[in-house]
Amino acid sequence: MTEIRYVDCDADLHRRVGKVMGEVAERHIRLEDGFAFVALDGNTPVGLIAVYGRSLLDPLADTDEGFINIIEVAEPYRRRGIARSLVEMSIKRCREEGRHQIRAWSSGGSADEAIHMWKSLGLL
């Protein structure tokens, strides 16, 4: 395996992510109102985080947050710090964009793994 590199997702990479990581991953990338980072092993997508912006409810309707729409790391690449790097990059981008918080929701079979990661990042 080569060194993992992290890049901003553009329209071309968005399509490649869909081919390699599946339709669900592709569908959760919202470049029109958010951003995504992709972890690459060579030219192969092996990890993804997609975040979009949204406003909070009243009385904070003028306050924006980033919502993690998906975070996914291919099974052979897990436990190598890829998800941590993707989350840290997203937090930094949200700060640069002036977002006041970043949130995520974990469900299904991956919830236990996600909760462990959030705790290790000091976010839960």
Image (cartoon, rainbow, N blue to C red):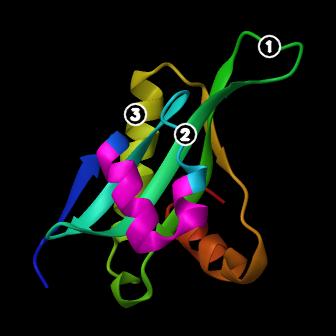
Question: Which residue appears at 78% of the width and 24% of the height?
Answer: 56
Q: Which residue is mark 2?
A: 30
Tell me how far mark 2 sits from mark 1, CA to CA.
21 Å
Q: Which residue is mark 3?
A: 93
In the rendered image, the residue lying farthest to the left is 2
Q: 48 and 62: which one is in front?
A: 48
Instruction: Identify residue type, mark 3.
Output: Arg
Q: x and y percent of residue 112 in the render?
A: 69, 81
Question: Which residue appears at 51% of the width and 48% of the height?
Answer: 50
Question: Which residue appears at 36% of the width and 90% of the height?
Answer: 76
The reply to whether residue 83 is in sight is no
Tell me how far mark 2 sits from mark 3, CA to CA.
15 Å
Q: How crowded is the residue under tag 2: few (<14 C-alpha within 10 Å), some, or many (20+)?
A: some
Q: Which residue is mark 1?
A: 61
Which element is circle 2 on? loop
Which element is circle 3 on? helix
Q: How crowded is the residue under tag 3: few (<14 C-alpha within 10 Å), some, or many (20+)?
A: some
1 or 3: tag closer to the N-terminus: 1
Instruction: Identify residue type, mark 1.
Output: Ala
2 or 3: tag closer to the N-terminus: 2
